[in-house]
Image (spheres, rainbow, N blue to C red):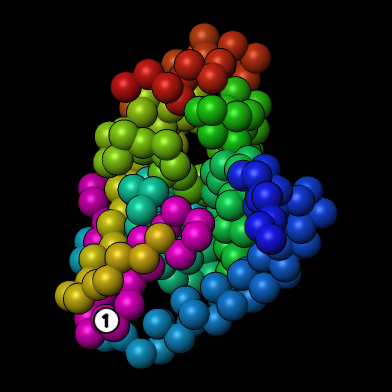
Amino acid sequence: MTTDRSPSSLQPQPWQKRVVNALKVAIVPPVGYQVIQMLRRTMTWRTEGFEHVSRLFRQEKRVILAFWHAQQLMMPLAIPGLVAHVLISQHRDGELIRRIVARFGLDAVRGSSTRGGAEALRQLIRLGRTGGNLVLTPDGPKGPRQVAKLGVVQLARATGLPIIPMAFGCSKKNSSRAGIGLSCPIHLHAASFSWGRRSQFRPTPPLTTSSVSVGSWKRR
């Protein structure tokens, strides 16, 4: 006797998805945090160009730190003790990232070009104007990969903060998606953080927190 199993009967039920998501939220952040800390302890580290950002911090200036989305896994280690507001998408995976970076003392602003972008940009402008450091990935989770959108420039003009580019590199890497859209370095020997010179844009007073739109993130 055969059993008829339609494709719909093989799909996870809503309650099963909720249980799986709840387990991910409970397990992934603490495990992810420990993995990052383990990598920090087991790799040889090098920094290049940190004077570009340390000089500004010594002058008590605030900055916008920008790096590519695929490199964000290791970025909490770039500047230990940094107090900053990080742009993170409202996607379910974004909640996992938010909980991981919170363990490093970083605050999250939720939004992206596809969901909640305009409100997130307004919130970042307010935070930048009141003295906060801002962190974001200019290519975003949807890409195109390593193609910067105009939103980071709009943010710099609206806040008057300089953009400091950052990058993470390593000598040996297996790229693993890790379920949250990140490039996860495995079996590393040496790694480095690099900072570029700041890009300063003339402030544009007409750009207010009420005039920005989601198009600010999407135009390239």
Q: Badge 1, how many Cα within 10 Å: few under 14, some, many 20+?
A: some
Q: In the figure, is residue 107 to the left or right of 138? A: right
Pinpoint residue 34: horizontal percent, then vertical percent.
Answer: 55, 81
Q: Which residue is drawn at 36% across and 65% down?
A: 176
Residue 130 magenta-drawn?
no
Q: What residue type is labelled 1?
A: Leu
**59 or 131, which is in the foreground?**
131
Q: Residue at x 66, y 57 (%)?
A: 2
Find disc 1 in the rendering and name its residue: 188
Residue 183 magenta-drawn?
yes
Q: Is residue 79 above or below residue 219?
A: below
Pinpoint residue 209: horizontal percent, then vertical percent.
Answer: 62, 20
Pinpoint residue 42: horizontal percent, then vertical percent.
Answer: 35, 90
- Residue 154 in sight in this render: no
Q: Residue at x 62, y 59 (%)?
A: 96
Q: What are the residue bounds of the magenta stretch?
A: 178-199
Q: In the figure, is residue 100 to the left or right of 157? A: right
**156 or 145, which is in the foreground?**
145
Pinpoint residue 152: horizontal percent, then vertical percent.
Answer: 41, 32
